[in-house]
Amino acid sequence: MAASMNNFDLTGGDLQWAQDVWTRTRAKIEAQCGRVGSGIPYIARDGRYGDKAAESIYWWTNGFWPGILWLMYAETGSKTCRRAAEAVETRLDTALAGYEGLHHDLGFMWTLSAGMDFKLTGNPLSRVRALHAANLLAGRYNPRGRFIRAWNKGHSGWIIIDSMMNLPLLYWASKEIEDPRYRYIAQDHADTVLKYLVRPDGSCNHIGILDVDTGALLETPAGQGFASGSSWSRGQAWALYGFALSYAHTGERRYLETALRIARYFTGEVSRFGFTPPVDFRAPEEPKKLDTSAGMIAAAGLLFLAGISENAEKDSNFGTAMKLLKTAEASYADWDTGRDSIIQMGTAQYHGKPEECHVPLIYSDYFFMESVYRLLHPGFEIW
Ligand code: GLY
């Protein structure tokens, strides 16, 4: 990484907490691996994950289960977890070959599956898969507008804040094949997102629609949050972590300053809600809709940010991350090893289906686990 990692020292209480939680996570994931295996979980219902890939091999969350399994493998060397992660990675080849259903979330899907496999085992086929995914992501770049388009048909000028978490696949590819093209695309996109989606107060739009020929901003419609101009909490979390990662990979201070600005905003907002984020910080008080996944992604991002920055906000960002993690663990964790999923109370989108509101989401578990893993192994590179 271009930015130096100075990381953080865990004090006794936090260290004990992280070790205890990891022990319970390990028991939970080992039991879950026995049940889920090479299935690809998304939302758990009545304590059981189904196989989202049977419905859509292209679904954007299909990399989080292998990500969880690889974190377990990194810590324990579990052959069972490794075999399940490898089997999921092989299943995802159908998506790479099928192409038509692929979208802007190639980074989520292949960074945590093939990318993690290559980092941990050196498997050459995994490297090829991750490079292939990076090329497909780079192929979505619009050189006039200087952005990576979101979604497919009918969305040619659309950019979204979530895309910031897909850029590490491009930074990795540039480094891997010693060619800056992918990094140039990632930086152009990050600069466009910074210009049009990040607001001066550190809050973010979810979506921007740009003129495909000039890149001029046309509209910022509502997305997964409450409304246009509101503040979808998971989007703020993606932006926080994504800009921190863009800084880490490029050393460009504007990305660090942006990540810190978003972190200040997120901390101020989430502290008003007792450190469990609502789906949207600017939604009406009723109906009350919470999204623990936003808190877990923000916690992972804040820990990463605390690990790469040396400013006065390092302690504050670390402190917010610990409050987010401890609040979720104390209020919304299910440690019963007979049931799938750890963190409950996630919500896919504000105006989404009722059956996707206040549910266990696979990415809440992934980012909870990544955060705890990072507390115990601060220098570990994932994204
Ligand atoms: N597509 C990313 C999200 O729903 O947060």
Image: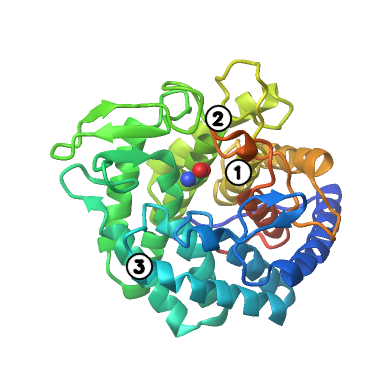
- Where does label 2 land, which residue? 350
Q: Using the rendered view, name the quadrant where residue 325 is placed.
A: top right
Q: Is residue 281 visible?
A: yes
Q: Nearer the viewer, residue 342 or 186?
A: 342
For numbered disc 3, what is the local secondary structure?
A: helix
Q: Residue at x 54, y 34 (%)?
A: 352
Q: Residue furthest left?
A: 213
C-alpha gap between disc 2 and disc 3: 31 Å
Q: Residue at x 25, y 59 (%)?
A: 139
Residue 98 image label = 3
- Where does label 1 land, which residue? 302
For numbered disc 2, what is the local secondary structure?
A: loop
C-alpha gap between disc 1 and disc 3: 36 Å
Image spot of residue 375 (x, y percent): 71, 55
Amino acid carrying mark 1 in the image? Leu
- Queried on whether the Cβ of the residue with tag 2 lies below 8 angstroms from ligand 1, the answer reads no
Camera-near label (2 vs 1) is 2
Q: Residue at x 65, y 63 (%)?
A: 68
Q: Nearer the viewer, residue 117 or 224?
A: 224
Q: Nearer the viewer, residue 100 or 192?
A: 100
Image spot of residue 88 (x, y percent): 56, 71
- Queried on whether the Cβ of the residue with tag 1 lies below 8 angstroms from ligand 1, the answer reads no
Amino acid carrying mark 2 in the image? Tyr
